[in-house]
């Protein structure tokens, strides 16, 4: 059966049945060694990503990233950045600010996806503000304009408003901020 795990995983993946592919990918990874495993890790990560399980997808994407050379990392960096941002936003919505911050900072550290950098800095600013770290939050809000590819988006305006709010009103809305 182990010989069939990878072909079955790939067949289910190609047909869009990602959840069915996952146990076969896990079996294939458990039985493999050598050069073929990086591609299988990436495929398994994609399957987890497709079913919305960014936490597990990131584990596989990061393992894959460690196994490949720097010049091969652009696609996986994009996927890690995208998944990290989505996971961070989800964690933030349920009060997991510190873990959310770590994931969103990973998006910024990779610089991918480029189109999401402004959103990532804005999210970092909001989290830091919630954590009472006003100066760092203000720095993050200032980065939104630099990272925004249009320079004129409503997100840039919101970030400037939040910066001014922290600067002049403070996190609780009373008195001088920082």
Image (cartoon, rainbow, N blue to C red):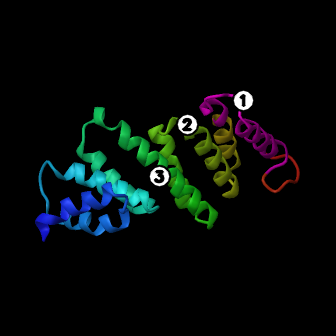
Q: For the view shown, which residue lies furthest in the front direction? A: 15
**Quarter occupied by residue 16:** bottom left
Within 10 angstroms of label 2, few (less than 14), some, or many (20 or more) residues? some
Within 10 angstroms of label 1, few (less than 14), some, or many (20 or more) residues? few
Could you give the CA–CA distance between mark 2 and mark 3, rounded to whole angstroms?
14 Å
Could you give the CA–CA distance between mark 2 and mark 1, rounded to whole angstroms?
14 Å
Instruction: Report the predominant secondary structure element of the magenta stretch.
Output: helix
Q: Quadrant of the N terminus?
A: bottom left
- Mark before the other along the chain sequence, 2 or 3: 3
Viewer-nearest residue: 136 or 103: 103
**37 on left or right of 159:** left
Residue wearing tag 3 = 83
What number is the disc on residue 152? 1
Indicate the position of residue 44 as horizontal and vertical percent values: 30, 58
Viewer-nearest residue: 25 or 64: 25
Viewer-nearest residue: 82 or 124: 82
Q: Secondary structure at mark 1?
A: loop
Q: Which residues are magenta?
A: 144-170
Indicate the position of residue 137 as horizontal and vertical percent values: 67, 46
What number is the disc on residue 115? 2
Could you give the CA–CA distance between mark 3 and mark 1, rounded to whole angstroms?
26 Å
- At 14% from the left and 60% from the top, the residue drawn is 32
Decide whether residue 140 is among the magenta residues.
no
Viewer-nearest residue: 45 or 7: 7
Total numbered labels: 3
- At 54% from the left and 56% from the top, the residue drawn is 88
Q: Quadrant of the C terminus?
A: top right
Indicate the position of residue 20 as horizontal and vertical percent values: 33, 68
Q: Does residue 147 lie above or below 167 as drawn? A: above
């Amino acid at each position: 059966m182990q010989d069939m795990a990878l072909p079955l995983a790939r067949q289910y993946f190609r047909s869009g049945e990602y959840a069915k592919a996952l146990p076969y990918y896990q079996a294939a990874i458990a039985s493999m060694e050598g050069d073929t495993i990086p591609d299988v890790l990436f495929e398994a990560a994609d399957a987890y990503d497709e079913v919305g399980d960014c936490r597990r997808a990131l584990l596989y994407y990061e393992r894959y990233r460690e196994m490949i050379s720097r010049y091969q990392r652009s696609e996986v960096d994009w996927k890690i950045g995208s998944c990290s941002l989505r996971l961070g936003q989800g964690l933030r919505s349920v009060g997991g600010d510190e873990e959310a911050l770590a994931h969103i900072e990973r998006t910024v550290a990779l610089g991918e996806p480029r189109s999401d950098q402004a959103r990532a800095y804005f999210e970092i600013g909001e989290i830091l503000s919630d954590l009472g770290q006003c100066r760092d939050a203000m720095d993050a809000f200032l980065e939104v304009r630099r990272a925004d590819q249009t320079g004129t988006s409503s997100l840039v305006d919101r970030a400037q408003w939040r910066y001014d709010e922290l600067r002049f009103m403070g996190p609780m809305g009373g008195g001088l901020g920082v």
